[in-house]
């Protein structure tokens, strides 16, 4: 049920009760009217109109603009007909208009239907006609006019807030339903497809040859499918990521400046031997910086395969900090002997120095390498989120 539906029901009751109240006021002072037949004719029309239009004030769909205009016209006409039906003395002394407080019902219909702006428009017209009927801005008239004006605008604003809350709630329920459906599909896939792929991978590794290659491909598909059903990520192709790795820094700077979700660039690196752990929310980073960071991760994984062997396990962890993005690549290989990196640089092999540390330095970031012989290697890559400005400063220093 709509959150505003109780307001429409309240408005229906208000219109009926205030119509009966206005008729009661007229009956109580019938002998004081100058032309009571005018009031009788007006109240006859008002009575028929109220009950004939009950479906119009049942909900927002039935309450059309044409109905609102006609309803407000009847209210304004009743105020002006007071000049004909009443004596000048009663009007000057502050006597009620023919529709009395029923007029507020027309204004409230505008408020519930269109919000505070529609309410302000309708209440302003009522205020002008009330001042014309009274002739002078008397204190009681101004008081009533301001009361209707403020109350209708407040109700209109509340209606707008309620509608916005209802839309937000509906969206939240849709997301919850979609999440539950994804979890159900993930369970079904885990119990069927993923287990079959894992079995093919194990049997292929045992048989070797073409079966081993088939098992390796099944393992990669298992990892990709597991990442898809668990996080809903749409990975970019490995080719685009490797293109970013191979190209010089000047080429990546010409890419689109729009931020990219870093997770989509790192998902292709997940395989049967590489585990990717990422936050549940997107990790936005400037496209050029994200591609350079992904290329550095690729270089770190290449080092794992080269020095730890094809069967070595590796783990990628993405952390989204307030001012930076941290990606950690860890393996279970034999580690790097002390002094080996310096020796490699002296021999001209600059894989770690250029492919990893050089890229991070150009982005204004940092690369920390921790390795203990026999306990594997850990590479921690840190890139500031304003890496574009930092990269420009680095290029100017060079």
Image (cartoon, rainbow, N blue to C red):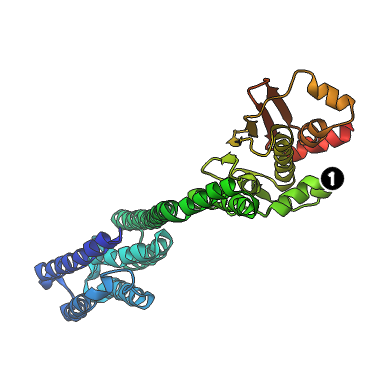
- Count the marks: 1
Q: Is residue 307 above or below residue 224?
A: above
| Residue at x 39%, y 65% (from the top left corner) | 114
Q: Position of residue 312 (x, y in %)?
A: 64, 35
**Closer to us: 250 or 74:** 250
393 horizontally vs 317: left or right: right
Instruction: Decide if residue 26 is on the left or right side of residue 269.
Output: left
- Specify few, some or many for label 1: CA neighbours under 10 Å numbering under 14, 14-19, or 20 or more: few
Q: Secondary structure at mark 1?
A: loop
Asked whether, in this view, residue 214 is left or right of residue 231, the answer is right
Q: Is residue 329 visible?
A: yes
- Residue lying farthest top? 338
Q: Position of residue 85 (x, y in %)?
A: 22, 75
In this view of the protein, can residue 90 be seen by the observer?
no
- In the rendered view of the protein, which quadrant contains the N terminus? bottom left
Q: Position of residue 151 (x, y in %)?
A: 32, 54
Q: Is residue 199 above or below residue 355?
A: below
- Of residues 330 and 61, the one drawn nearer to the viewer in this rendering: 330
Which image quadrant for residue 390?
A: top right
Residue occupying the point 30% across, 68% down: 106
The residue lying toward the viewer, choosing from 242 and 17, is: 242
Question: Which quadrant of the figure has residue 365?
Answer: top right
Q: Quarter holding the C terminus?
A: top right
Report the residue marked by disc 1. 248
Q: Is residue 327 left or right of residue 124?
A: right
**Coordinates of residue 189 in the picture (x, y in percent):** 44, 55
Q: Relative to the observer, which residue lies in front, 15 or 329?
A: 329
Where residue 24 sits, quadrant-wise, is bottom left
């Amino acid at each position: 049920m709509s959150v505003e539906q109780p307001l429409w029901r309240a408005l229906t009751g208000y219109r009926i009760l205030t119509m009966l109240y206005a008729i009661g006021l007229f009956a109580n002072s019938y002998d004081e009217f100058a032309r009571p037949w005018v009031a009788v004719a007006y109240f006859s029309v008002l009575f028929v109109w109220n009950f004939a239009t009950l479906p119009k004030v049942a909900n927002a769909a039935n309450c059309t603009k044409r109905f609102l205009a006609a309803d407000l016209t009847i209210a304004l006409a009743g105020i002006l007909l007071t000049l004909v039906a009443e004596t000048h003395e009663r009007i000057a002394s502050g006597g009620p208009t023919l529709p009395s407080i029923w007029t507020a019902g027309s204004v409230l219909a505008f408020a519930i239907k269109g919000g505070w702006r529609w309410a302000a428009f309708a209440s302003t017209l009522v205020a002008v006609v009330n001042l014309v009927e009274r002739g002078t801005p008397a204190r009681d008239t101004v008081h009533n006019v301001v009361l209707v004006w403020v109350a209708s605008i407040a109700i209109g604003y509340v209606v707008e807030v309620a509608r916005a809350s209802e839309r937000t709630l509906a969206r939240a329920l849709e997301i919850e339903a979609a999440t539950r459906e994804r979890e159900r599909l993930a369970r079904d896939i885990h119990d069927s497809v993923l287990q079959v792929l894992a079995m093919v991978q194990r049997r292929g590794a045992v048989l070797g040859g073409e079966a081993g290659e088939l098992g390796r491909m099944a393992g990669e598909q298992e990892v990709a499918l597991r990442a898809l059903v668990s996080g809903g990520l749409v990975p970019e192709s490995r080719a685009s990521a490797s293109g970013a790795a191979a190209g010089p820094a000047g080429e990546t700077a010409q890419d689109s400046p729009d931020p990219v979700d870093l997770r989509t660039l790192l998902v292709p690196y997940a395989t049967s031997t590489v585990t990717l752990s990422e936050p549940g929310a997107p990790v936005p980073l400037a496209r050029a910086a994200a591609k350079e960071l992904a290329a550095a991760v690729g270089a770190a994984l290449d080092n794992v395969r080269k020095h730890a062997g094809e069967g070595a396990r590796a783990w990628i962890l993405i952390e989204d900090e307030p001012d930076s993005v941290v990606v950690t690549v860890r393996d279970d290989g034999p580690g790097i002997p002390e002094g080996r990196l310096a020796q490699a640089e002296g021999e001209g092999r600059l894989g770690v120095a250029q492919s990893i540390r050089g890229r991070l330095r150009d982005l204004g970031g940092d690369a920390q390498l921790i390795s203990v012989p026999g306990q594997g290697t850990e590479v921690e890559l840190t890139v500031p989120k304003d890496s574009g400005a930092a990269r420009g400063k680095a290029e100017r220093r060079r």
